[in-house]
Amino acid sequence: MQKAKLTDQFDHNRNLIQNAVQIQKNEDMKFRQFSIAGHKAAVVFIDGMVDLTRLQHFILSPCMQVAAFPENVSIADHLSGQVLEIASLDWTEEMDMLLLRICQGDAAILCDGMQGALIGEVKGYARRSVGQPVNETVVMGPHEGFCETMRDNVVLIRKILRTPALISEAVMIGDQTPSRVCILYLNGVAPMESVDEIKRRIANCHVDHVSSLGMLEQLLEDNPFSLMPQAVTTERPDRAASFLSEGQVVILMENAPTALAMPAGLFHLYHAPDDTSMRWQYGTFLRLLRMAGMLIALFLPAVYVAMTVFHPEGMSLSLLTSVLESQSKVPMTLFPSMLLMLLAFSLINEAGARVPGAMGASLSIVGGIILGQAVVEADMFSPLLIVVVAISGLGTYAMPTYPLTMAIRIMQLMLVVLAGLAGYPGIIMGAFLLLVRICGLTSLGHPYLSPLSPARPANPDLIVRLPIWRQRLRGYMANAFRMQRTTGPMRAWDKEEK
Amino acid sequence: MSTPPTRRTHTAVHSREAALNLRQAAALKNQFTLSALHLYAQLIAGFAFMLYRHVSTPGYMSVMLLFLPLWAGYALSCHLRRKCGLMEKRCGRFAKGLLSLCLFLDAQMSLYAFTEIVRELLPDYNSALISLVSLLCVLPSLRNQNAHALPTLSHFLRWPMAVGFSFCMLGAARQGETGHLFPLFGSGGMKIFSGAWWLCSCLSAALTPLYAHSSAATRSQERKNLRSLLLGLFAAAATALLSAWLIPYYFLARPDTVGSHLMITLRINPSLLSWSCQVCLMLMLLLISLACALSRSRYLLSHALGRPVSGWAGLILVPLPALSTDLAHQLVTLLSPLRTLLMVLALLLLSITGKNIKEENAA
């Protein structure tokens, strides 16, 4: 179907636009008609989405003061060069583009004799200011977080990476209601293959509307049936900047207070934002703690079920006695008890996430006292089981990213079911399946467990974090020609390092 | 009628990654083939006699010593074949087919061992069910999409397994139970020498799946640093544990079951963590070896046939462990010499004619 185009006939353009935006029904769609040097003209905008003061002072007033158009210069050139006092001004002849820009909060200027429209950026809709990240709090490091305005988010990143090498390319996604997506990368550092691949994938997503970044992530990821997330989401501009300097590509989207970094591996999910801000000893300690938490969260409930139900011979007599004593008064067997407790724990988590802030304290009382104390006193669950569930729950909380927490929680349930069915062999089979699946994963074509396996050149910054001056490489996903962060010693003043 | 578009997740624009993957795949193929050769060259003698019920420990040792010249001859042929050029293609394919069959039989053995251990742990479960479930667990790793998953897994697990095995070994060593850990070692210089020889051969065998993923360049680099030493230690630990549990069972043909050997380790390492570690690592090791054997077998078979082979062919592995214990024992006893025969034939073909698999794969 041929796309509608604007002509130099004002009346034709007016009818075209008024029909397209259904101006009779849309009460906030404004078509303000006036005249410029005797020519019929109009400004089209959506009330509430534009800054009316800027519109009036820098578009309407200057236009109305034009006495005549010069003969040798076109109307559009004269308006953009001599009259309109706004910084960002575009030209379009496409009807689709015109409507899209109007819907984005810009104002379109039409004039009789002008074969197209000028679009001035006078956005002025209500928006949240830059605040603290809610889900990625850090002890050390900046406290700025992304907001819902994409332009502000780009600025937040640019504020950190003040280099012209930082490229932000805008693309649209969504067939019927397009959304603006911004692809950011460091030119020369990020391999163009990654950038091209992301563009290719976005261009080949055919969906009416993409409402969130999470939806976009699901449309872009390599293995949609995998439990593990294949991209990192962050609310922190400093973390996004860190991904960019490592050679990854960051995707921002309008109305999304997060950024998406691709490609990503398991270690990107395992690292916390303030690992790098801390001294390397503290960072290493915290990472090891986190690793222990992850393993405990995954395996402790399953191992407890397997040991108690299937392999009591592996336990020492004192431990076995203690377990059996605690379990003896409970009417349910251990396996369903464990499943119920884990589900109850997940329920408390979910309720905690949804409950209004003021009721959070009540929820923790309900969760802590009723589920913790009352069920033990009522002999519904053994105290040891609750201790196991609580410790594994703490392990899941130690994960720095929410998607990883969710993945671990689901895997934990799967392993408990397998342990309840077949003890240690069940756990091992489940772990083998999960590991094979994770080992086979890719993110944007990059192996998920790299640089550990397959081995790639990398900094000593995977499971432990060695001193910053030993980290002389960018991420393995960076451009091969720009892998070195520095050519000389990082601590040039230090004779020993020289 | 137009063909449906293929799903494209690994993009062609990934020139650097694609090149790396290609190189890695080539190295991987070489490694698969070569490590298969290596592995079976080392273990061939052992498996020939491992299930022969009347072989006693001294007898086994003497057999191992008899095979020493064979290893030397094999090493010599490895050296010479580089100078001999390519072998006739058809002959090479035939040898690969034989190797593939051997690997397939080895997968049977691994599955059998896994089933036996699980049966010991879960006596209420049917062995047919156990075999079927373990196969279903392994077969996804053979899918084409997971071509790199298995070597990645073995590469990834080397450290956790090394730590786990070392932990168990230390526990046992503290108890002074070296006799259980190294049952092949005995008193007398010759016994120690033959046991050490066997251990060294197993060490290289244990290393092969771990090194399968690394490219030649990475490997040579790795040798220079501490990692290779630790890896060697891990291999030694893994081999020692294998020798403690599985190998005595097979090689010495004692009337004990594998499960009873697990109980020995329970007596050695009474701590909860140690026992759990041992059991779980052992089961994981067997699953990996089963998957590796199947994967290598399929790869060699596809080379031998000149076309890709479906991974689901592994389902025919089900019958053996599903059979009654006595019948399975007898069948394994029969299969073992058969495999040895096939392996000897394949090795002879490859060694005598100077086959250079690396060059063929590169071509």
Image (spheres, helix red, strand yellow):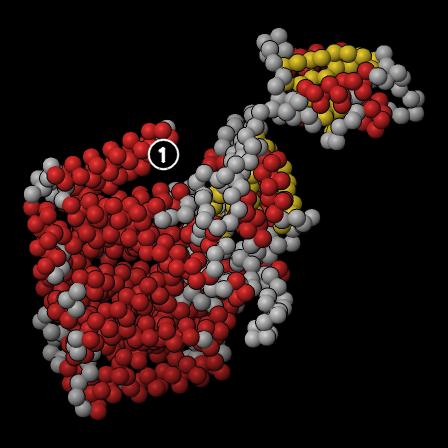
Q: Which residue is mark 1?
A: A353
Q: Name the quadrant containing residue A19.
A: top right
User: Can the viewer see residue A366 in this picture?
Assistant: yes
From the viewer's perspective, is residue A198 above or below residue B207?
Answer: above
Q: Residue at x 31, y 49 (%)?
A: A395
Q: A7 or B234: nearer the eye?
A: B234
**Quick check: A71 left or right of B89?**
right
Quick one: which residue is furthest to the top in this view? A24
Q: Name the quadrant containing residue A436.
A: bottom left
**Quick check: A128 left or right of A361?**
right
Identify the chain of the residue marked 1, using the numbered disc in the image: A
Q: Amino acid at mark 1?
A: Ala
From the viewer's perspective, is residue B261 above or below residue A163?
Answer: below
Q: Is label 1 in a helix, a strand or a loop?
A: helix
Q: A355 or A190: nearer the eye?
A: A355
Q: Residue A366: x percent and y percent?
A: 24, 33
Quick one: which residue is furthest to the bottom in this view? B189
From the viewer's perspective, is residue B8 above or below residue A72?
Answer: below
Quick one: which residue is furthest to the right in this view? A71
Q: Residue at x 56, y 32 (%)?
A: A129
User: Can the viewer see residue B336 in this picture?
Assistant: no
Q: Residue at x 32, y 72 (%)?
A: B234
Q: Residue B355: x percent and y percent?
A: 43, 76
Neighbourhood count class around disc 1 (C-alpha, 10 Å): few under 14, some 14–19, many 20 upward: few
Q: Residue B89: x percent and y percent?
A: 45, 70
